[in-house]
């Protein structure tokens, strides 16, 4: 966005339901607004947007002739029988939607930088390619080989991976819910959880857990990690895509450290 000279305006979410505030989003739209960007499933809260939320967002985009950038890289990782709904499948959305997917989450291939965009609108695709040279094509041979193997041979592995992640999610949520000074929502998707640590800033909580528990987490806000906006202040992000034995050790250390506060 910055490279294109655009200004990013953050929209709030409801802290209780974690749904996006439609009226608040409407108030942010001005004659200069060009695009709505959404991450679904949501990173870092793990919310999976429902049909009515997506319908409202698409209606707003249509009313103001806005593009939609829908980051759906987590789309395969949803829990409790939920189904991910692609934004582009909502009526009247497909011609104005850029959908982003990748291999790093579903197939545990983070670092290979292999992803793709789905754009039905031919004119939009042409403009997309013209404005992002160098970003669309430099995929190394190793990543290409790994991506092909993932698509052709790793379907069963990915299904089992999601079953495993759901068990890990349940365990991490339970441990955090029982911890003092912690407020946490149960993720509906992704493999990250975003608890709020009361009485500490995000950076303070991150530094404390690294020093006291020897566990590295990502601060929800504060330099140099300001990805999640000021609403992430006081939160930390924990990635739980690992083995049960490792996550048990990590949570034992985290809970022990939090109990000392």
Image (cartoon, helix red, strand yellow):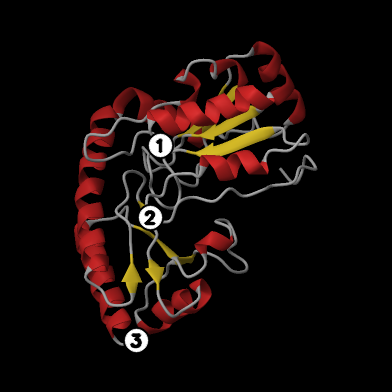
Dot 3 alpha-carbon crowd within 10 angstroms: few under 14, some 14 to 19, many 20 or more: few
Residue at image position (28%, 77%) is: 180
Residue 53, given in percent of the width and then of the height, sits at 44, 33
Residue 137, given in percent of the width and then of the height, sits at 64, 29
Labels 1 & 2 near each other (Cβ < 8 A): no
Dot 1 alpha-carbon crowd within 10 angstroms: few under 14, some 14 to 19, many 20 or more: many
Could you say which is closer to the camera, residue 194 or residue 148? Answer: 194
Q: Earlier in the sequence, mark 2 or mark 3?
A: 2
Residue at image position (44%, 35%) is: 103
Q: Which mark is residue 261?
A: 3
Q: Is residue 73 above or below residue 12?
A: above
Q: Quadrant of residue 236?
A: bottom left
In the picture, the quarter occupied by the C terminus is bottom left
| Residue hosting label 2 | 16
Q: CA distance from mark 3 to mark 1?
A: 35 Å
Q: Which mark is residue 49?
A: 1
Dot 2 alpha-carbon crowd within 10 angstroms: few under 14, some 14 to 19, many 20 or more: few
The answer to whether 74 appears left or right of 157 in the picture is right
Which mark is in front, 3 or 1? 1
Q: Earlier in the sequence, mark 3 or mark 1?
A: 1
Which mark is in front, 1 or 2? 2
């Amino acid at each position: 966005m910055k490279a294109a000279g655009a200004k990013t305006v953050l929209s709030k979410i409801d802290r209780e339901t974690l749904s996006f505030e439609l009226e608040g989003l409407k108030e942010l739209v001005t004659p200069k607004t060009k695009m709505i960007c959404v991450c679904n499933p949501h990173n870092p809260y793990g919310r999976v947007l429902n049909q009515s939320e997506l319908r409202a967002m698409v209606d707003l985009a249509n009313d103001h002739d806005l593009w939609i950038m829908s980051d759906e890289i987590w789309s395969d990782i949803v829990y409790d029988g939920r189904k991910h709904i692609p934004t582009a499948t909502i009526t009247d959305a497909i011609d104005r939607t850029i959908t982003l997917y990748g291999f790093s989450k579903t197939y545990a291939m983070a670092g290979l930088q292999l992803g793709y965009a789905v754009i039905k609108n031919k004119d939009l695709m042409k403009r997309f390619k013209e404005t992002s040279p160098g970003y669309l094509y430099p995929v190394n041979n190793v990543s290409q080989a790994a991506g092909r193997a993932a698509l052709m041979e790793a379907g069963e592995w990915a299904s089992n991976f999601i079953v495993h992640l759901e068990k890990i999610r349940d365990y991490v949520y339970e441990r955090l819910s029982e911890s003092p000074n912690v407020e946490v929502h149960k993720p509906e998707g992704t493999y990250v959880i975003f608890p709020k640590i009361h009485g500490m800033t995000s950076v303070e909580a991150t530094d404390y857990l690294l020093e006291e528990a020897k566990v590295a987490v990502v601060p929800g806000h504060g330099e140099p990690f300001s990805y999640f906006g000021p609403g992430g202040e006081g939160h930390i992000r924990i990635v739980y895509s690992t083995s049960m034995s490792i996550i048990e050790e990590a949570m034992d250390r985290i809970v022990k450290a939090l109990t000392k506060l």
